[in-house]
Amino acid sequence: GSNLVRGFDIGKKAPTYKHTFIKLDGDDKVYQAGGDFRNEFETTIADLRDKRVLTFGTGEITALTIAAAQKVITLTKEDVPVEQAGEQAGKEAMKTRWKDESGNTIEDAAIDKLLGTLGALDCQGYLENRAKADLGSPEITITLRGTKEYILTLFAGDGEKEPASSSENEYVFVLPDNLIDSIKKSIEEFTEAPGQ
């Protein structure tokens, strides 16, 4: 709460490497506290912040819309019956497949890769003093529909940082370069698919 329970200064690691020198508030003596815990107190606010910016179960997503490069693509998931052979013949089984607006089937592996990347998305860090409203027009917007709607928005970079925002996080953040490259590569596969 608001009451200070204990105050102390943390010194160097003791020569034993199993203790840390400390000095308690109001006491001029130097003590050795058990453990090398200096690193636990040398964290920044950025180190303490939760980096998870988007979370959903990949199986819950039934449709996704990608708006990029002045193109909008909507993909939907549907269940189709599959014929079974052998002992399972006559029993109805269903298989999931993804289709675009023109009815073209999209490769499951490409969708699975994108959903896997976005389903538990961690940012690299947050951009302080930046608000979502200040970011302007997005470069890429991915809207995923499942039990609810999830939106990931990527903006053109200012310098080397490409800001992003998510419907699941109120702050502006940046993603690691390899994640941005992976997302953009997946989007290119969909935009270059037949019928697009």
Image (spheres, grey):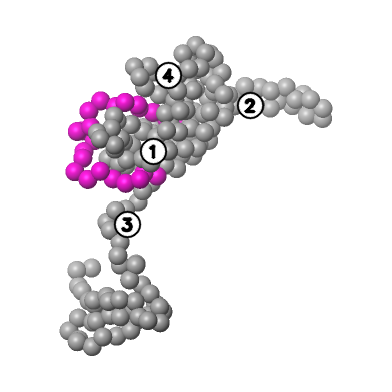
Q: Amino acid at mark 1?
A: Asp
Which numbered marker is on residue 95? 2
Residue at far front of view: 15
In percent of width and height, residue 2 lies at: 19, 68
Neighbourhood count class around disc 4 (C-alpha, 10 Å): few under 14, some 14–19, many 20 upward: some
Rendering quarter of residue 7: bottom left
Pointer 3 residue: 48
Between disc 4 and disc 2, the foreground one is: 4
Pointer 1 residue: 177
Q: Amino acid at mark 4?
A: Ile
Q: Secondary structure at mark 2?
A: strand
Please, is residue 146 above or below residue 103 in the view? below
Rounded to the nearest whole Å, what is the CA distance between mark 3 and mark 2? 43 Å
Which numbered marker is on residue 73? 4
Quick check: can you spot residue 147? Answer: no
Whichever of callouts 3 and 2 sits on the residue coming sooner in the sequence is 3
